[in-house]
Image (spheres, grey):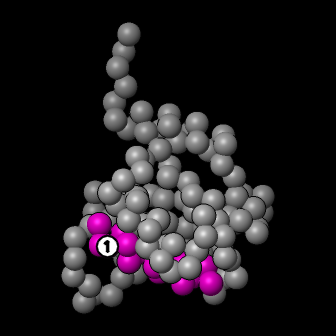
Amino acid sequence: MATLTTLEARRRRHRRIRGKVAGTAERPRLAVFRSNRGISAQLVDDTGARTLAAASWLNLKKSFKGDKTEQASEVGKLLAAAAKEAGVQACVFDRAGYLYHGRVKALADGAREGGLQF
């Protein structure tokens, strides 16, 4: 029996989660992407197939100093601000197969702190 690589296991978890989680215009899906360098997130309306708001570590101010967990928290706050501009108050969290701790949890907490409900 072949063992899964870390990436294959994450993709399998992501496929399983996406079968259960879908976003609408009223409650879009908060999709997270985590790389080694940074983190990004977007609010996606799956029924209309469009992105309502997005935020990335590249959108942070150049003067930002902190580790990647603090970076993720700031991205969550930026996303919450962009969501308010788009008129979104609630969303469904899609962790994309990543475990809910560390940077993914920090992004979710930052988004909640900014006013998003999920």
Image quadrant in which the N terminus is located: top left
Specify whether 117 is left or right of 62.
right
Part of the protein shown in magenta:
69-84
Q: Point out residue 72 in the picture as x, y percentages from the top left corner.
A: 36, 69
Q: Tell me the SS state at disc 1.
A: helix
Is residue 49 at all visible to an observer of this figure? no
Given the image, on which type of amino acid does mark 1 rest? Gln
Residue 69 vertical position relative to residue 94 in the rendered view, above or below:
below
Is residue 70 at all visible to an observer of this figure? yes
Q: Point out residue 82 in the picture as x, y percentages from the top left corner.
A: 57, 82
Q: Point out residue 28 in the picture as x, y percentages from the top left corner.
A: 68, 64
Residue 100 vertical position relative to residue 72 in the rendered view, above or below:
above
Q: Point out residue 51 in the picture as x, y percentages from the top left corner.
A: 64, 68
Q: Local crowd at mark 1 within 10 Å, few (<14), some, or many (≥20)?
A: many
Residue 15 figure quarter: top right
Identify the main secondary structure in magenta: helix
Q: Residue at x 40, y 81 (%)?
A: 59
Q: Which residue is mark 1?
A: 71
Queried whether the magenta region covers residue 45, the answer comes back as no
Q: Residue at x 42, y 51 (%)?
A: 100
Specify whether 61 is left or right of 11.
left
